[in-house]
Image (cartoon, rainbow, N blue to C red):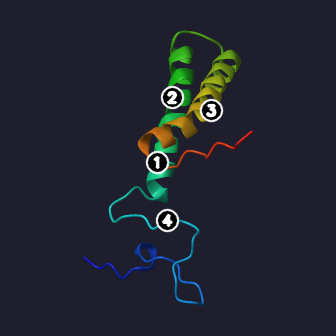
Amino acid sequence: METNRPEHRPAQTPGGQAAPGRPVRPPGSAGIGSIFTLAFLMILVPGVAAYALLRLAGLAIGPAGLLGLAVMFICLGLYPALLQRLGWVRRRARRPR
């Protein structure tokens, strides 16, 4: 396994030390493609499924579409919490008051 790839090396400053910005991800951790796939599965799929089920139940296209969109907005609001629970995004540091 090659560990010299750019995504596994810390960013170097002109002084030769690691930059304090982003932490280096360990090999095998979730990448940006995984986050987009999870977003697709958690936001779009439930909304389309709600729309399809409501249409099958006999609701008109307008109300079914609006309710499906509402499901997407609810899932969009829950998505950051899921990323934090999975450990893919760090929690924000609380500001002292």
Q: Nearer the viewer, residue 26 or 28?
A: 26
Query: How busy is the neighbourhood of tag 2: few (under 14 within 10 Å), some, or many (20 plus)?
Result: some
C-beta proximity under 8 Å, tags 2 and 1: no
Q: Position of residue 62 (x, y in %)?
A: 70, 19
Sequence-first tag of 2 and 1:
1
Find residue 67 and report its image quarter.
top right
| Mark 3 or 2, nearer chain start | 2
The residue identified by callout 4 is 23
Residue type for callout 4: Pro
State the residue position of label 2: 46
Q: Which mark is residue 37?
A: 1
Q: CA distance from mark 2 to mark 4?
A: 33 Å
Q: CA distance from mark 1 to mark 3?
A: 17 Å
Dot 1 amino acid type: Thr
The amino acid type, in three-letter code, at marker 3 is Gly
Residue position marked by numbered label 3 in the rendering: 77
Residue at figure coordinates x 55%, y 66% from the top left = 22
Q: Residue furthest top?
A: 58
Q: Where residue 28 sits in the image (x, y, percent)?
A: 32, 61
Q: Residue at (69%, 22%) from the top-left corner?
A: 66
* Residue 74 or residue 84, whichever sits in front: 84
Is residue 49 depicted above or below 94 in this figure? above
The amino acid type of the residue labelled 2 equals Pro
SS at circle 3: helix
Question: For the residues marked 2 and 1, what is the alpha-carbon distance in whole angstroms?
Answer: 14 Å
The residue at 45%/68% (across/down) is 24
Question: Is 43 above or below relative to 68?
Answer: below
Quarter occupied by the N terminus: bottom left
User: Which tag, 4 or 3, sits closer to the chain's start?
Assistant: 4
Give the residue displayed 46% in from the left and 49% down from the top: 88
Q: Quadrant of residue 63?
A: top right
C-alpha span from label 4 to label 3: 26 Å
